[in-house]
Amino acid sequence: MKWISIVILLGLIWPAPASLAQTRSRPREVSPPAESILRLGETQAYREPTAVSLFPGRSVVIDFRNGEMISFIQVSDPTYVLFQTNAAIETGNAKTIVLRLSEGIRFEHLTQSDRPNLIVTTTLPDGTLHTYSFDLNIRSGQPVAGRDFNGIAIVPNPETGDGNTIQTSLGAATLNDLTVGLRLSIQRGYTAANDPIVGQIQELLARSRNGESLMELARTQRISMRLLSALGEIALAEQQPRRPISTPPPSHESNSRQ
């Protein structure tokens, strides 16, 4: 009776989710960081594929917060990737996709890939179509706070009017942030000072300060928006207060199926 009373007491203090209470004990939870949703400007999002990491037992969302509604979805290899939308696509009200992994469903005559991708077409109220591509990275283990995200939010482009703000996982990066990020990248040995890309980015930043659109220059000169976003993140991370690490960070998991 003593042990039964303890079990009942624990159940009152930490109730299991209704869907799991009758079947198995509650697994250890991974608390997501406050910045668990990566915000991307819509132009940046549909110009280049966006990487999305999928972990066993966890859902990831792609949320269109820019007024676009989902009209078409295709997963290149659905063997391990399942998706749902918050509303039926044919209703014209679907704006959120939830992705998760399965143990594997074989489809006859369908090729498989360790790096499948997701294609999403959206419709604006005026009928304009946008097509987005997402690279799906199937990972093992659990997500690492501060490195992996629980989802992606596609948001309107920053209302700066100049096209010179880059969305990053840490917020919007300005031209000054990109300049600082480039300088820190060279100082830390991420790239060599004489690398041709350094000169290209310096020219891009100079022309942007003279009134040209950073986004348009990056497109015409074929400079990756991911690279510019990474430079912005380096600068923004430098501005954030340092948090002490009490335990060693988890080891990096390779991108592989279990």
Image: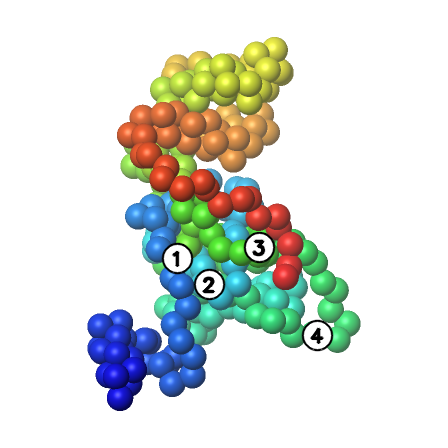
In percent of width and height, residue 140 lies at: 57, 56
**Disc 2 vs disc 4: Cβ atoms closer than 8 Å?**
no
Task: List the residue tagged with mark 3.
Answer: 139
Q: Which of pointers 4 and 3 lies earlier in the amino acid sequence?
A: 4
Q: Are marks 2 and 1 in contact (CB under 8 Å)?
A: yes
Disc 2 from disc 4: Cα separation? 23 Å
Residue type beneath disc 1: Val
Residue 107 found in image quarter: bottom right
* Residue type at numbered disc 4: Phe
Q: Give the mark nearer the N terminus: 3 vs 1.
A: 1
Q: Is residue 124 above or below residue 196?
A: below
Q: Which mark is residue 107?
A: 4
Classify 10 Å Cα crowding around label 3: few (below 14), some (14-19), many (20 and above). Answer: some
73 and 246: which one is in front?
Answer: 246
Whole-number angstrom distance, CA of label 4 to CA of label 3: 21 Å
Circle 4 packing at 10 Å, graded few (<14), some (14-19), many (20+), is few
Task: Find the distance from the CA under tag 3 to the CA under tag 1.
Answer: 15 Å
Kindly report the distance in space between the C-alpha atoms of the residues bearing marks 4 and 1: 32 Å
Q: Amino acid at mark 2?
A: Arg
Residue at the spot 29% in from the left edge and 82% down from the top edge: 3
Residue 58 numbered tag: 2
Q: Residues within 10 Å of mark 2 (few under 14, many from 20)?
A: few
For this view, does 41 lie left or right of residue 14? right
Residue 45 lies, in percent from the top left, at 47, 45
Q: Is residue 121 visible?
A: yes
> Which residue is the site of mark 1?
30
Q: Do residues under tags 4 and 3 come within 8 Å of each other at their CB atoms?
A: no
For the N terminus, the image quarter is bottom left
In the shown orientation, is residue 39 left or right of residue 195? left
